[in-house]
Amino acid sequence: MIVKLETAGLVCPFPLEEAKAAMAKLNAGDGIEIEFDCTQATETIPNWAAEEGYEVTHFDQIGDAKWTITVVK
């Protein structure tokens, strides 16, 4: 199961904090698809995923300053 998490409009570190809270509720094998527009999160979210041992299965820029990333627990 992949949960969509819309964080566009939130300044850093809130996209990461929302991602952490959402991921804490999921089971292994589930994930979150995060849409965000905070440039800092292009580094902080993948770094957090790596530190936690989560897999980034998708990471794409979808606008001038908007990205989507999928992280699986």
Image (spheres, helix red, strand yellow):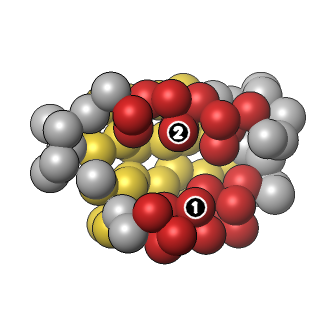
Label at residue 13: none
Residue at horizontal 36%, vertical 63%? 54
Q: Report the Cα–Cα distance between label 2 and label 1.
A: 9 Å
- What amino acid is at disc 1? Trp
Q: Nearer the viewer, residue 58 or 53?
A: 53
Residue at horizontal 17%, vertical 48%? 28
Query: In the rendered image, which residue does mark 1 sit on?
Result: 48
> Which quadrant, please, contains the N terminus?
top left
Pick whichever of labels 2 and 1 is earlier in the sequence: 2
Q: Are marks 2 and 1 in contact (CB under 8 Å)?
A: yes
Label at residue 20: 2
Residue 34 place in picture, x, y as percent: 49, 41
Q: Is residue 24 left or right of residue 61?
A: left
Residue 23 place in picture, x, y as percent: 39, 38
- What amino acid is at disc 2? Lys
Graded by Cα atoms within 10 Å as few (under 14), some (14 to 19) or many (20 or more), the crowding at tag 1 reads some
Residue at horizontal 68%, vertical 48%? 66
